[in-house]
Structures are given as structure tokens and as C-alpha cells.
Image (tube, rainbow, N blue to C red):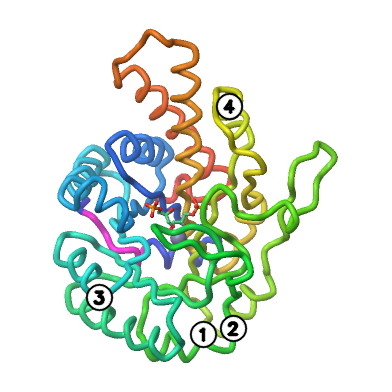
């Protein structure tokens, strides 16, 4: 089937109590690792491209890689989404350039300005058969070149969501309930330590999510910053020359719970980066004489695939839903 929008995916996910995985793509091996897992697990998927990915790999290369995945995986629905669109022009370029979904992220702007910018993108997108994700609230962490300190982050205010959605006409809404971008989501001071000495982050604000959902029945909610920062990969990186102290993510059982509620899209990027980096570091440590990129990218791609499979089956609940 051709590239799809997220409309049908989200309706089924909402009704079925699961979420669609939205994985960031930057090169061929990442596209292949994700979509091979989705094909084998019969899972619908969102492949998303950030401003940084477009700057790194070029719009056309990324679109063509995703189109290749669509040809290789004809039996699963695949959406191509712009992640954190910074302005109308970038959204327009992606709408005109083959994407089926865009995010306009004006969450750092005042409420009225966020509405105005989002509405403009929605009008253009809907005229071209493309759907729009918007954001209310501010996540901590690093997105593209923007770093938001924990103290500057703010939870979504549920009392604003009805006005925002009705005035903008957006198709899904990213909210801030305590997730955060990157591999260093929380400072040690924000966490407690469990019996193994691993940092345990503060729990997600399910009260905020539930109040948002009560006010927007049937409406798809999105969680950004939802990597769980697998400790086996942090360890692998640190054992092979890396230095990632106190990297900690969102516990997977909390994401599973969110997927059972109104959360229909869960964004995961950092976990794939950790899998790729850990695998390559280990390979170089074990084979200092090797220099063929295919030899180290092959196991990296295989580990991305297995990590995505785990997310589909054990966290998102979307395996078998294609
Ligand atoms: O939220 C941001 C995504 O993880 C994309 O990251 O801007 O480094 O491509 P990037
Ligand atoms: P992570 O950094 O937690 O993977 O979040 C990715 C994300 O939200 C992309 O928009
Ligand atoms: Zn994000």
C-alpha cells in the first residue's frame, strides 16, 4: 500500500488500547532496522524526520529511503512524518515534498501565537490531504539545537486543550506529562536510586493525561521524549570507551500504561541511537583491524531491529495490528 496518513492508525490504536511507534530516521540502516521489525511483527509504523535529519541526509534521500521501505513492506501501513516542524515554511516543504503528516511545534510560543501558527499549518496541510500534530506544554531535554532546562519545562495545562484543538483543527496533540528528550532525561537530583543503584525517574503525570483525555474524548494524544534508555546499551557503551554516566529514561511499564489510555503515538529516537552506538563501539573494540562500514553497520542494524521488535511487542502493543 502507498504511504498513509495517521488518521486510520490512530483511530484503531485509540479503540484498541495500544500506541503506534514513531521512530526517527536518519539513514538507510535505521529505516531498514525499523521497518524489517514492523514487517515481521505486522505493525503499523510512523517514520519521522526531524529538521536535523533533513539537514544531515537531505529531504529527497530520506523520502526515497522511506519509499523503498514502502515497496519492501507492502503489507504494513507506513506514515512519513515531520518531527518538530519549527515553522510554516518547513511544514509546507514537507507537505509539498511527499510527507503524509507534519508536526508544527510552536509550543515555546505564547498560547495565542501557538494557535495562530498551528492553524495556518493545519489549513495548508488539510488542503493537501496531510494531517497535523501540534504541541501544548514544554518538554525538558534537547531537540535539534534547542535545549530546554528541566526548570524551564512545563506540564500541559488541561484547561487549555479544548480551546487549542477546536481553534487550530489539529489532528493529534503532543502533551508534556514528564517525558523529556535525549538520553539524559533527568538529573540525579530529580531521581531516587533503586536497590541496584540505578536512577529511578519521577513518575509520569497520569493525572494530567487523564484530565486532557476527559476533555478531548476520542482524540489522539502523542508522547515525545519516550525513550527508556536501555541500561544494557548504556553499559555496553561505557564498557567500550564511552562515557554516559547517569543516563536514564522513561520506565517501559509507564509507557505501556499510557498506550492503553489515549496515547496513540509514542516517539522513540534516543534508544535506537544507543543501540547503534553501543553495537559499533563494541565492534571496533573487538575488531580494531576492521574498516569496512558494512561489517559494523550490519550488527548495528540487526540490534535496532530487535530493539524495535521489543518496543512493538512489549511496550506499544501494536504488533499484529497492521
Ligand atoms: O526530538 C528530537 C528527535 O530526537 C530528533 O533529534 O533533532 O537530533 O534529529 P534530532
Ligand atoms: P527520545 O529522545 O526520548 O527518544 O524522544 C524522541 C522524540 O521525542 C522525537 O520527537
Ligand atoms: Zn520530540
In primary-sequence order, the first of circles 1 and 4 is 1
Q: Badge 4 local density, few (<14 within 10 Å), some, or many (20+)? A: some
Q: Would residue 187 be seen by someone viewing this image from the given angle?
A: yes
Q: CB under 8 Å between callouts 1 and 2?
A: yes
Question: Residue 188: where, in percent of width, then height?
Answer: 72, 51
Secondary structure under tag 1 reads helix
Magenta range: 3-8
Q: CA distance from mark 2 to mark 3?
A: 26 Å
Q: Give the residue pinned by disc 3.
A: 88
Q: Is residue 106 above or below residue 41?
A: below
Sequence-wise, which precedes: disc 2 or disc 3?
A: 3
In the rendered image, residue 299, in percent from the top left (x then y), is placed at 41, 22
Which residue shows up at 18% across the image and 45% down it? 61
Please tell me in which quadrant of the rendered image residue 237 appears.
top right
Q: Which residue is mark 2?
A: 158
Determine which residue is flagged by label 1: 161
Question: Which marked residue is nearer to the observer: mark 3 or mark 1?
Answer: 3
- Tell me which numbered mark, 3 or 1, is placed earlier along the sequence: 3
**Does residue 18 appear in this view?**
no
- Is residue 291 found left or right of 152 in the rendered image? left
Tell me the SS state at disc 3.
Answer: helix
Decide which of 276, 22 is in the foreground and name it. Answer: 276
Q: Is mark 2 within 8 Å of ligand 3?
A: no
**What distance separates the C-alpha of mark 2 from that of mark 4?**
40 Å
Q: CA distance from mark 3 to mark 4?
A: 41 Å
Q: Residue at x 17, y 73 (%)?
A: 128
Amino acid at each position: 500500500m502507498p504511504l498513509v496518513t495517521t488518521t486510520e492508525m490512530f483511530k484503531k490504536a485509540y479503540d484498541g488500547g495500544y500506541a503506534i511507534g514513531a521512530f526517527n530516521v536518519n539513514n538507510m540502516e535505521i529505516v531498514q532496522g525499523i521497518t524489517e521489525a514492523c514487517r515481521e511483527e505486522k505493525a503499523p509504523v510512523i517514520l519521522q524526520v526531524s529538521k536535523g535529519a533533513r539537514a544531515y541526509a537531505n529531504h529527497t534521500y530520506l523520502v526515497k529511503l522511506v519509499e523503498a521501505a514502502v515497496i519492501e513492506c507492502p503489507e504494513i501501513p507506513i506514515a512519513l512524518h515531520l518531527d518538530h516542524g519549527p515553522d510554516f515554511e518547513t511544514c509546507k516543504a514537507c507537505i509539498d515534498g511527499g510527507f503524509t503528516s507534519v508536526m508544527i511545534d510552536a509550543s515555546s510560543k505564547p498560547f495565542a501565537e501557538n494557535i495562530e501558527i498551528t492553524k495556518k499549518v493545519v489549513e495548508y496541510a488539510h488542503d493537501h490531504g496531510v494531517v497535523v500534530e501540534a504541541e501544548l506544554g514544554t518538554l525538558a531535554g534537547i531537540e535539534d539545537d534547542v535545549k530546554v532546562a528541566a526548570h524551564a519545562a512545563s506540564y500541559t495545562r488541561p484547561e487549555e486543550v479544548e480551546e487549542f484543538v477546536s481553534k487550530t483543527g489539529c489532528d493529534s496533540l503532543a502533551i508534556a506529562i514528564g517525558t523529556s528528550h535525549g538520553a539524559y532525561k533527568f538529573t540525579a537530583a530529580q531521581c531516587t536510586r533503586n536497590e541496584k543503584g540505578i536512577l529511578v525517574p519521577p513518575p509520569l503525570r497520569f493525572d494530567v493525561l487523564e484530565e486532557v483525555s476527559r476533555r478531548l474524548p476520542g482524540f489522539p494524544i502523542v508522547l515525545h521524549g519516550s525513550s527508556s534508555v536501555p541500561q544494557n546499551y548504556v553499559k555496553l557503551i561505557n564498557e567500550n570507551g564511552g562515557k554516559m554516566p547517569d543516563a536514564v529514561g522513561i520506565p517501559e511499564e509507564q509507557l505501556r500504561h499510557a498506550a492503553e489510555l489515549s496515547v496513540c503515538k509514542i516517539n522513540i529516537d534516543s534508544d535506537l541511537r544507543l543501540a547503534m552506538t553501543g553495537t559499533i563501539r563494541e565492534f571496533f573494540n573487538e575488531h580494531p583491524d576492521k574498516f569496512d562500514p558494512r561489517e559494523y553497520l550490519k550488527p548495528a542494524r540487526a540490534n535496532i531491529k530487535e530493539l524495535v521488535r521489543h518496543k512493538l511487542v512489549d511496550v506499544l502493543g501494536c504488533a499484529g495490528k497492521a
